[in-house]
Amino acid sequence: MSPDTTTQHAPKAPALWDISPPVDAHTPAFPGDTPYQQQWVATLGPGCPVNVGAITLSPHLGAHADAPLHYDPQGQAVGALDLAPFIGPCRVIHAIAPGPLVMPHHLAHALTAPLPPRVLVRTYQRMPQREWDAGLSAFAPDTVTQLADLGVVLVGIDTASVDPADSKTLDSHQVLRQRHLRVLENLVLDDVPEGDYELIALPLKLMTADASPVRAVLRALTPALASAPTLAPAIPAASLATATSPAAESPDHSQ
Ligand SMILES: [Zn+2]
């Protein structure tokens, strides 16, 4: 029998988690969206020193950031967005198989202070990277509202949309609009333990697009980053306790 080396050398946590699915012709697209296509404009050969491709794709393919222009005719295009929300401390919260909607109670166990201003939610045991899932889990609008109330500026999810795939009203997208939240969709959080990390997921500077692919990664927090000032004011423990209590009314910040 060969010795079991896996128990002798416990795997070290990676310094970098790639939380982006592969993008190619097999990447699932929202029904009606443009799949990934690639042509070769030039190919290596006698008289041609390079390969050069031309790609066509919906900007909502793979890990991506929606811009307000996606759900608001007056909204900013993705290239105009402030980058600060897309980089910095974040919390990964597991809400595996929550059903159609991630409700506030699915996240309550992990909303402890101090809460970083970015929250990524894992709903899949294994994120389907090769087939479309019409039964995806979305955010309940109340969940997005609660996160905004807690000072969160960016929410992320491992499904294709923060609203149900057949939604015509896009209620959670509308809360994003009202509360000026940034959003990441189609993340792969399969191998990421719950906890706090540094998120890096910058959208491209596409000046007229309604979304952009991102290469989303998580890095282990350094002590300096962990204690760095957040974008939002520190959330007092008392308000977190209030906000996670189902009996408490959250204050209405909308105008
Ligand atoms: Zn999108």
Image (spheres, grey):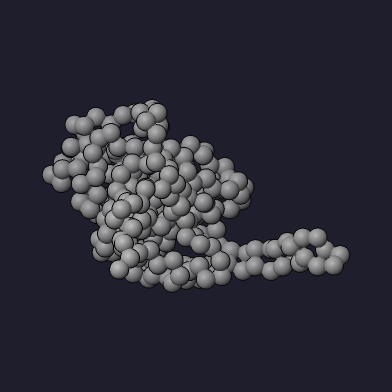
Frontmost residue, 44 versus 60: 44
Q: Is residue 254 visible?
A: no
Q: Is residue 17 visible?
A: yes
Quadrant of image for the N terminus:
bottom left
Q: Position of residue 183 (x, y in %)?
A: 43, 49
Task: Name the quadrant containing residue 36.
Answer: bottom right
Compared across the picture, whether 111 is left or right of 160 comes to left
Q: Position of residue 160 (x, y in %)?
A: 42, 61
| 108 vs 187: above or below | above
Task: Name the quadrant containing residue 236.
Answer: top left
Q: Position of residue 131 (x, y in %)?
A: 43, 72
| 166 vs 77: above or below | below
Residue in the image at 61% along x and 49% along y: 206
Residue in the image at 85% along x and 67% along y: 46
Residue in the image at 49% along x and 46% along y: 201
Compared across the picture, whether 237 is left or right of 126 comes to left
Q: In this view, which residue lies farthest toward the right?
A: 47
Compared across the picture, whether 157 is left or right of 202 comes to left
Task: Name the quadrant containing residue 123.
Answer: bottom left
| 121 vs 180: above or below | below
Count of numbered labels shown in the rendering: 0
Residue in the image at 52% along x and 45% along y: 202
Q: Position of residue 227 (x, y in %)?
A: 35, 28
